[in-house]
Image (tube, helix red, strand yellow):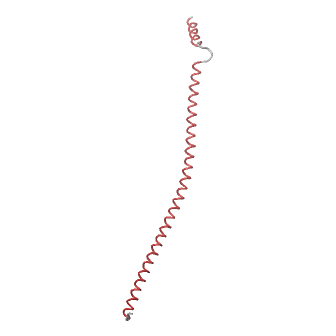
Amino acid sequence: MTERGPGGHTDHLDHLQNDVSEVTSLLRQNVEKVIVRGDKIDDLQERSEDLESGSINFKKTSVRLKKKMCWQNCKMNCIIAFVAAVIVIIIVIIIVVEVKPGGSGGGGHHNSTLNKCFNC
């Protein structure tokens, strides 16, 4: 066995102490990285919760808007149908008034008879 002098023993202790310092430094850096990573994870979790609540609000708003637009479309279709029905009724009334029911062709004969009477 080799005997170590006082200088050899301290060199070995210094070397071990340097190794311990390096390991301690690495552990501190790793702990800091874990803390930073944890903060980033917390931040991402907050963002994802905000996105989730935003998507829920978006869905509610879109459903409400869909119902509103469907109702508005229904009202517009009813208005168009009402206007079309009024136009058809007006056209039918005009045709009925012009044709005058109950005297097939008598209307023209009546006018010529009146003209003859006035000429007399």
Of residues 19 and 27, which is closer to you in this image? 19
42 on left or right of 17? right
103 on left or right of 38? right
In the image, residue 7 above or below residue 91: below
Quarter of the N terminus within the rendering: bottom left
- What residue lies at 47% left-to-right and 70% top-to-bottom? 37
Q: Where is residue 101 in the image (x, y as percent from the top left)?
A: 61, 18
Q: Which residue lies furthest to the front in this view?
A: 1
Q: Where is residue 59 in the image (x, y as percent from the top left)?
A: 54, 53
Q: Where is residue 26 in the image (x, y as percent from the top left)?
A: 42, 78
Q: Quadrant of residue 96?
A: top right
Quarter of the C terminus within the rendering: top right
Q: Position of residue 53 (x, y in %)?
A: 54, 58
Q: Residue furthest right?
A: 102
In the image, residue 20 above or below residue 35: below
- What residue lies at 63% left-to-right and 16% top-to-bottom? 102
| Number of callouts | 0
- What residue lies at 55% left-to-right and 47% top-to-bottom? 66
In the image, residue 64 above or below residue 23: above
Q: In which quarter of the image is residue 104?
A: top right
- What residue lies at 39% left-to-right and 88% top-to-bottom? 12
Q: In which quarter of the image is residue 25?
A: bottom left
Of residues 99 and 10, which is closer to you in this image? 10
